[in-house]
C-alpha cells in the first residue's frame, strides 16, 4: 500500500532517522536517500524513506491548483 | 511546509477541482461524443479514488478503470498456493506483508495455517525479517517477496543486510512484478480503450518520469504521474483530460515534489547489484517475459525458490473474475460473486482481500451505487 502522507525527519542517524507522521514517531531507514537532512519531509514505504519532498515543487503544485480554480471562477463570472 | 502539504486534502481546493474536472470532461464529451477513459495503474490509486469519493463524484463524466497495480491481486494462483505450501514446512518462520494472510489459496490461506500453529508473522518493515532470522538460528526464515518496483528495493536491502551479517537461515521467496511489461501487455492486447494512464506515484519515485517515454514513442498514449492525495489525483485526471481533449500525447509529471526525471539512482544501484530480470506469471494473463526481478545466481543462498522444494497441484477453479478485473475488462460488480459469495469476510479472490484490491475498494466505499 502506497501511503502519500509525508513524514518529517526529527532525528537523523547514519542509515536511519526518527520521523514524525501526524504526531506519531517511528524510525525509518534512510539508505535510499543519503542526502536527507533534519527537518526534511520524506515519503516512506515499508519502513524505508524513498524520496525527499521538494518544498518548491510542493508549493508550486498548490499554486497550480489555485490558478486552475481561479481561472474557472473567472470564466464562470464572465 | 506542513501547511503546504495539507492543502492536497483541503476541501476548499478539492471541491472546485472536482467541478473543474467535470467541466473539462464535458468538453471532451462534446468534442468526441464519449466519456474520457483513464486507467489508474496503481492499486493505492484505486483505493484512494474510492475512499476519497472522487470516483463516485466523477462516475457520470469520467471512466476510471482500475488496472493491474495491486501486487497481491496480480500474483497468479499457483504462486499463491506455492507460498501457502511453503509455510507448511517444519522449523520455518514465514514473514509477510499483512495483505497476503487472507488471500485464498486453492485449499487454505496463510491465516488458516497460522491458526493451525504455523509460525507466520506479519511485518510492516520487512527488514525486521533479517533480525528475526538472526534471533532464531535454528529456524529457516523466509520473507514472501510480493511487490512492484516500490517494494523491490526493500527486498534488496534485506539481502544486503543478511549478506553483511552473514545470516545463513534467511531467504526471500521472490515473486515480484514490474509495471512496464504489464502495461505493454495491456496495450498490445488492445482490449481496453484508453485516453491515458494515471501512472503510479511511488513506483515513479523509483523509475523516474523519463522511464515512461515508451508509452509516447511506441504506443502513442499519454500518462500522468499522480500522487495519492485528493487534489493530486484530481489535478492528474484534469491534466489527462486536457491532453486528450487537445489530442496531445505526453508524459506529465504531476507529482514533481517527489518524482524526478530519472528516478532514485541509489535504488537503481541496489537493483543492479542484486537483481536480474525474470519471467513472471500474472493472474488472468499468464507468463509475461521479463516482467519480474529475481536474485542474481550469486545470491542463490538467499533465494528461497532455490533452497526449498514446494509441490503444488493444478489450482482450484472458481468463478472468481479477478483476472478480468485487473486487466480492466470488467468492473467488480460485473462478477456474479461480488457482494454475494465473495465478501471481505469470505473472499473468493485476492481483489476482495487486499487493501489495494478493486473489489475491496468497491465493496467498502461504492456499494450504494449498485
Image (cartoon, coloured by chain):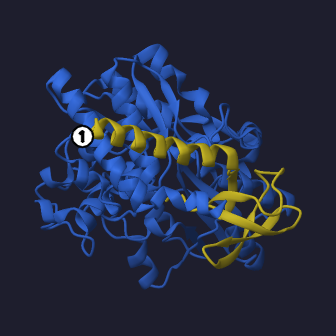
Chain colours: A yellow, B blue
State the residue lying farthest toward the right: A14
> Is the C terminus of chain B in the top left, top right, bottom left or bottom right quadrant?
bottom left
Q: Residue at x 45, y 64 (%)?
A: B85
Asked whether residue B176 is in view, the answer is no
Foreground residue among B35 and A13: B35
The answer to whether B135 is drawn above or below residue A41 in the figure is below
Foreground residue among B290 and A17: A17
The answer to whether A65 is drawn above or below residue B351 in the figure is above
User: Residue B148: percent from the left, percent from the top?
Assistant: 53, 47
User: Residue B12: percent from the left, percent from the top?
Assistant: 40, 59
The answer to whether B293 is drawn above or below residue B240 in the figure is below
Foreground residue among B173 and B197: B197
Q: Residue at x 47, y 55 (%)?
A: B229
Q: Residues within 10 Å of mark 1 (few under 14, many from 20)?
A: many
> Is the N terminus of chain B in the top left, top right, bottom left or bottom right quadrant?
bottom right
Left or right: B79 as drawn, with respect to B37:
right
Q: Residue at x 54, y 58 (%)?
A: A4
User: Residue B10: percent from the left, percent from the top?
Assistant: 45, 61
Asked whether residue B16 is in view, the answer is yes
Q: Residue at x 27, y 68 (%)?
A: B364
Chain under callout 1: B
Quarter-of-image position of residue B363: bottom left
Instruction: Look at mark 1 in the image and give the residue it sits on.
Output: B62
Amino acid at each position: 500500500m502506497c501511503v502519500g502522507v509525508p513524514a518529517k525527519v526529527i532525528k537523523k542517524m547514519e542509515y536511519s532517522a526518527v520521523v514524525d507522521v501526524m504526531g506519531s514517531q517511528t524510525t525509518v531507514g534512510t539508505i535510499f536517500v543519503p542526502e536527507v537532512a533534519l527537518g526534511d519531509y520524506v515519503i516512506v514505504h515499508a519502513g524505508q524513506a524513498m524520496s525527499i519532498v521538494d518544498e518548491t515543487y510542493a508549493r508550486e503544485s498548490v499554486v497550480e491548483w489555485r490558478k486552475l480554480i481561479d481561472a474557472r471562477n473567472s470564466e464562470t463570472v464572465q | 511546509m506542513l501547511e503546504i502539504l495539507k492543502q492536497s486534502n483541503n476541501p476548499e481546493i478539492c471541491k472546485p477541482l472536482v467541478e473543474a474536472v467535470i467541466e473539462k470532461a464535458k468538453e471532451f464529451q462534446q468534442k468526441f461524443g464519449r466519456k474520457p477513459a483513464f486507467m489508474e495503474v496503481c492499486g493505492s490509486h484505486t483505493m484512494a479514488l474510492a475512499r476519497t469519493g472522487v470516483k463516485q463524484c466523477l462516475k457520470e463524466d469520467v471512466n476510471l478503470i482500475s488496472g493491474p497495480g495491486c501486487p497481491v491481486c496480480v500474483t497468479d494462483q499457483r504462486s499463491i498456493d506455492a507460498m501457502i505450501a511453503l509455510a507448511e514446512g517444519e522449523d520455518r518462520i514465514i514473514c509477510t506483508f499483512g495483505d497476503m494472510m487472507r488471500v485464498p489459496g486453492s485449499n487454505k490461506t496463510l491465516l488458516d495455517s497460522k491458526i493451525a500453529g504455523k509460525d507466520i508473522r506479519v511485518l510492516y518493515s520487512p527488514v525486521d525479517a533479517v533480525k528475526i532470522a538472526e534471533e532464531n538460528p535454528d529456524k529457516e526464515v523466509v520473507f514472501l517477496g510480493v511487490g512492484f518496483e516500490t517494494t523491490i528495493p526493500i527486498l534488496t536491502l534485506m539481502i544486503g543486510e543478511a549478506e553483511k551479517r552473514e545470516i545463513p537461515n534467511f531467504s526471500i521467496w521472490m515473486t515480484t512484478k514490474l509495471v512496464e511489461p504489464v502495461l505493454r501487455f495491456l496495450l498490445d492486447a488492445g482490449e481496453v480503450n484508453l485516453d491515458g494512464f494515471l501512472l503510479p506515484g511511488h513506483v515513479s519515485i523509483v523509475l523516474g518520469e523519463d522511464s515512461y517515454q515508451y508509452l509516447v514513442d511506441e504506443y502513442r498514449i499519454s500518462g500522468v504521474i499522480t500522487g495519492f492525495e485528493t487534489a493530486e489525483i484530481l489535478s492528474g485526471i484534469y491534466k489527462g483530460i486536457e491532453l486528450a481533449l487537445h489530442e496531445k500525447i505526453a508524459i506529465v509529471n504531476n507529482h514533481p515534489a517527489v518524482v524526478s526525471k530519472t528516478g532514485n539512482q541509489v535504488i537503481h544501484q541496489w537493483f543492479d547489484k542484486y537483481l536480474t530480470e525474470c519471467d513472471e506469471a500474472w493472474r488472468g494473463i499468464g507468463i509475461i517475459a521479463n516482467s519480474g526481478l529475481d536474485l542474481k545466481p550469486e545470491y542463490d543462498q538467499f533465494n528461497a525458490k532455490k533452497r526449498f522444494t514446494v509441490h503444488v497441484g493444478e489450482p482450484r477453479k472458481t468463478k472468481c473474475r479477478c483476472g478480468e478485473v485487473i486487466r480492466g475488462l470488467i468492473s467488480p460488480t460485473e462478477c456474479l460473486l461480488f457482494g454475494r459469495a465473495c465478501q471481505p469476510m469470505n473472499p473468493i479472490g485476492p481483489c476482495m482481500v487486499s487493501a489495494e484490491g478493486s473489489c475491496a475498494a468497491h465493496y467498502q466505499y461504492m456499494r450504494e451505487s449498485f
